[in-house]
Image (cartoon, coloured by chain):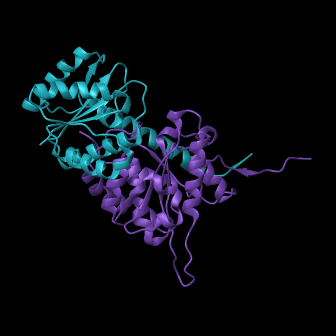
Amino acid sequence: MNSVFISYFPKTRKQAEALAWELERLGVSTWLPGRQVSVEAALESQMLDAMKEARVVVFLVGPQISASDWVQREYRAALERFWLDEDKILMPVLIGNADQPAFLRHPPSIKVDGRRADWARVAKEIAKILNEGVPAKKSRAAIKEQTDRLDLIEKQAYALRASEVPKIV
Amino acid sequence: MKRQPQTFREHFGAGKLTTIPSKSVFVNCPFDDDFETLFDAIVFASTCCGFVPRSALESGTVAESRMERIARAVFSSKYSIHDLSRCRGEGNENLARFNMPLELGIAMGRRMATPRKKDKHDWLVLVREGHQYAKYISDLGGFDPKIHDGTTENLIRTVVAWLATRPEAIPLATPRKVINAFEVFRKKKAELVSEWGREVPWADLVLAARKTVPRLG
């Protein structure tokens, strides 16, 4: 059974391997998806199984890189697994000034510079999370973000409704 | 000569009614009775994810061609959802509807016409289980259409899983809560239909969805 699934962008593969190596040193099993297009269907099936088994899903996000189609599939799979099993922990690890993926905006994240020495620290933090879990807390920021966006939708809908009354010019 | 009075209206997505493309999703689905519940499910799921749903229906019966309205709505939305389930022979004449693939083509054109990667249009294509899309739009083969079973529950999960992972999505309740709230939205829509008949203003539909979104906290 894999305890930690590591999702990474193609450009952050080396960092993902460094993190996996540090986790394995601590006795934590890991799963990193391969990238062979020729076996994509089989890879997707393996990815879904590994995502299901993993207790923690780590998202390694590099700076100024858009998520590829494959990474977006991993995001969707992780979110769908999380909806079925809220004990699963989704953990973003942001390299440099990388933006946190929107669907992970409010869980706690780990920030790193991307140096080799960082990965031992990150591995220890993840191992600790595996043992102790993440303290559950209600995110006020998430509630505010939802409220603000719904206000925007309402404003736009009212603007549309106002436009439905013909004017004379 | 004295200028004749003209009626005009500003269109949603233009002028002072400009929407924010990155927070808008164009819904391209059949509008008929058979698909109505699924159409509502997509509108509601989109709103729950924090997006303004856009549609060819939004500007009512104004003097603008349907194609112009659709193109304007697609070009002012970063995202679009296309259900191709109805692209199969129907009725005595066994005719298929091709509005949906046509509108998907507009969305693809918008993506190609957008220079900046982060602003590029992105779409979700939906097909029913057992659908033969690959046989008549083989160019779609590489776009990984999502298969749904024709139930609102399955469709909501599919749409939420896609939209919730877009960069502009907001945190939302679980799909189970969205599915439960959908029934409340349907009741609100039924009230609108009893007032407006089949011509429910798009804005009112969006407002009903927005008021039904399950809140966090």
Residue B130: quarter of image: bottom left
Q: Quadrant of the C terminus of chain A?
A: top right
Q: Color of chain A here?
A: cyan
Q: Give the residue at x 44% y 44%.
A: B51
Q: Give the residue at x 53% y 62%.
A: B137
Closer to us: B105 or A142: B105
Closer to us: B13 or B166: B166
x and y percentages locating residue B57 in the rendered image: 55, 58
Q: Color of chain B here?
A: purple
- From the viewer's perspective, is B65 left or right of B42? right
Count of labels shown? 0
x and y percentages locating residue A9 in the rendered image: 35, 32
- From the viewer's perspective, is B142 left or right of A48? right
- From the viewer's perspective, is A54 left or right of A15? left
Closer to us: B65 or A26: A26
Residue B131: quarter of image: bottom left
x and y percentages locating residue A158 in the rendered image: 51, 45
Relative to B151, is A6 above or below?
above
